[in-house]
Each structure stands twice: as C-alpha cells, then as structure tokens.
Image: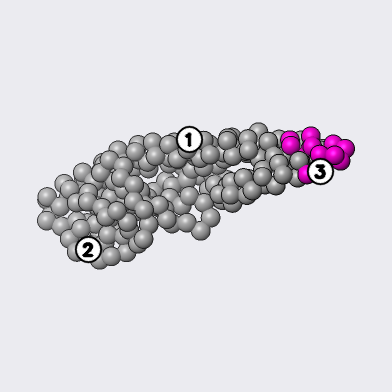
C-alpha cells in the first residue's frame, strides 16, 4: 500500500473512530460493554497530539512538494500528503465537537436520574435532620434501589457526606459520577445541595449542566 493511500485511509477512518471512542462510555446500553468502552476511550488519548502535528505536517509536505517539484512524482505525492493532513484537521476538529456535545447531552440525562437520589436525600434529611452515611441507607424507604447512571462506562453514583470534592463541608454532601475522559484523567460530574459551584475546582474548569457541574480535569 502506498504512503499516500495510508494517509488517506487514516483521514477517512480516524474521525469516525474518534466519535465512537469518545462517546461509547456514555451510551446507555449494553452495560456489558462498559470496560471495553473505557479501553476504547483510552485509545483516543493521542488525538490532541495528532491534531497539533497535522498542521506543521501539512506545511512541511506543502513546502517540500514545491521545492522538489522537479523530481518525478514528488509534487503529486507530497501534495496529496499535505492535503490529507489538512483534511484530517478539517474532519477531526468537528468530530471532537460532536463528541463533546454527545457527552454533554448524556450527562444531562444522568443528572435527571441523579435527581431521584437528590430528592431521596432531601426526604431523608427532612425526616431525620441529617444526611445518611451512605446511599444504601435510602433503600428501601426512600428509593426502591440505587439507580443506574445510564452511562455504561460510568455506571455508579458515588456519595460522600460532609465533603465538597476533597474539601470538608460539614452538613453538606457530594453526589458524583467519576467519568475520566481518557488517559490519566479525573473528570467528574458532581452535585452539591447548594447548587452553587465555583468557576474552578482544584484548578480545573467547571461546566454547569442543570443543577449539576462537570469538572474538566
């Protein structure tokens, strides 16, 4: 297979792979694919590096196509490689945008599910004047069962009493979904009863989604 064909195959197949890799963790089913979805997500961690390389590579191939135009086949081959790099950029950047939009919609749905737990915690506190030590204390009186998040890669809600993120916060709690987005990453989707979140948490950007917040590590 020629090098030009390899470049174009990469251009055609990587953006769809990127969308699948970045979004499979937030599919609602089948849950059995949770771990494979996380593995696929980790396989996409080089995306940013590839995008950063693509533009200099396009410039390199474009310049060398001109400087070597008198050598047989060089203008066509290197021009094709330069165009492939530009097309890779043109397809990959929208693919990232699509992936982010799909993830945002998925976490909005997860927040609606999480609101069932939020209401159960509020009812528990109204009855007993404090929050429970664990979510299991809500079952069966306040919840029939702890709900599934609806995200195959991040199936469980986590709960910590008297904490906001890593900071002690007596009388409050944090409900969260740990949702790493590939590689060494600690993204999380959180809920605080006050529904008031700072613009940054532990130096990381915060995206408001309904009454919840997505912390981008």
Q: Can residue 55 be seen in this view?
A: yes
Residue at (64% x, 48% y) in the render: 56
- Span highlighted in magenta in the image: 67-80
Question: Label 2, label 3: how many angstroms apart (C-alpha)?
Answer: 66 Å
Which callout, 1 or 3, points to the residue nearer the camera?
3
**Which mark, by number, is residue 68?**
3
| First in residue order: circle 1 vs circle 2 | 1
**Which residue position is annotated with label 2?**
169
Q: Can residue 135 be seen in this view?
A: no
Q: Classify the position of the N terminus by image quarter.
A: top right
How crowded pointer 1 is (Cα within 10 Å; few <14, some 14-19, many 20+) is rated as some
Badge 2 local density, few (<14 within 10 Å), some, or many (20+)? few
* Residue drawn 30% across the image and 38% down it: 112
Numbered disc 2: secondary structure: strand
Q: For this view, does 30 lie left or right of residue 177?
A: right
| Quadrant, the C terminus | bottom left
Instruction: First in sequence, mark 2 or 3: give its number.
Output: 3
Residue bearing mark 1 = 98
Q: State the CA–CA distance, disc 1 to disc 2.
A: 36 Å
């Amino acid at each position: 297979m020629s090098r030009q064909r390899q470049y174009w195959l990469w251009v055609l197949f990587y953006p769809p792979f990127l969308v699948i890799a970045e979004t499979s963790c937030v599919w609602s089913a089948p849950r059995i694919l949770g771990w494979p979805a996380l593995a696929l997500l980790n396989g996409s961690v080089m995306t940013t590096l590839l995008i950063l390389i693509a533009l200099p590579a396009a410039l390199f191939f474009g310049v060398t196509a001109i400087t070597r135009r008198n050598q047989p086949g060089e203008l066509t081959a290197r021009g094709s490689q330069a165009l492939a790099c530009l097309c890779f950029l043109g397809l990959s950047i929208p693919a990232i945008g699509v992936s982010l939009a799909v993830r945002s919609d998925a976490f909005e749905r997860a927040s609606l599910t999480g609101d069932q737990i939020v209401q159960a915690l509020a009812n528990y506190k109204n009855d007993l004047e404090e929050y429970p030590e664990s979510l299991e204390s809500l079952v069966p009186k306040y919840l029939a069962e702890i709900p599934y998040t609806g995200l195959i890669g991040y199936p469980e809600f986590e709960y910590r009493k008297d904490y906001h993120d890593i900071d002690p916060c007596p009388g409050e709690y944090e409900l969260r979904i740990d949702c790493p987005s590939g590689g060494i990453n600690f993204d999380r989707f959180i809920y605080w009863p006050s529904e008031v979140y700072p613009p940054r948490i532990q130096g990381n950007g915060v995206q408001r989604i309904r009454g919840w917040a997505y912390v981008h590590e």
